[in-house]
Amino acid sequence: MHMFHNVGKTDRIVRAILAVILGVLYFTKTVEGDWANGTIIAAIILLMTSLRQCCPIYALLGFGTCGIDPGKSDKKIETKKLEL
């Protein structure tokens, strides 16, 4: 199976840090009610997109934050905007 990547290293790190912060806010009950549910859902989505290195919203927009290393041109990914 071919893995599609459109999330770069810095973007992955930021997503993971935000996921941890949101997780801490949820588990320490700093946020409650509907905000808590939204917080944990956002944390899970950020963590999953960070680990998979793929963001569906980026794919829809034809956007990506992967840098292209000239020495590793085989890892170049071309993103295209999806026509809906």
Image: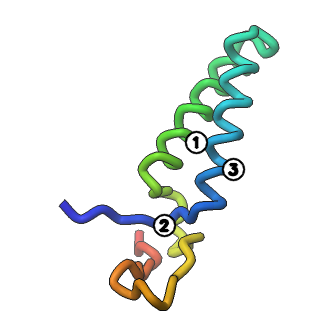
Left-right relation of 37 to 66: right
Residue topped by disc 3: 14
The earlier-in-sequence mark between 2 and 3 is 2
Q: Nearer the viewer, mark 1 or mark 3?
A: 3
Q: Is residue 15 above or below residue 59?
A: above
Furthest residue toward right:
30
The local crowd at label 3, few if under 14, some if 14 to 19, many if 20 or more residues have their Cα within 10 Å, is some
Left-right relation of 52 to 26: left
> Looking at the image, which residue is at 46% across and 76% down?
81
Which quadrant of the figure has residue 65? bottom right
| Residue 35 placement (x, y as % from top left) | 73, 21
The circle on residue 6 is 2
For the N terminus, the quadrant is: bottom left
Q: Nearer the viewer, mark 2 or mark 3?
A: 3
Badge count? 3
Which quadrant of the figure has residue 66? bottom right
Residue topped by disc 1: 46
In front of the other: 34 or 70: 70
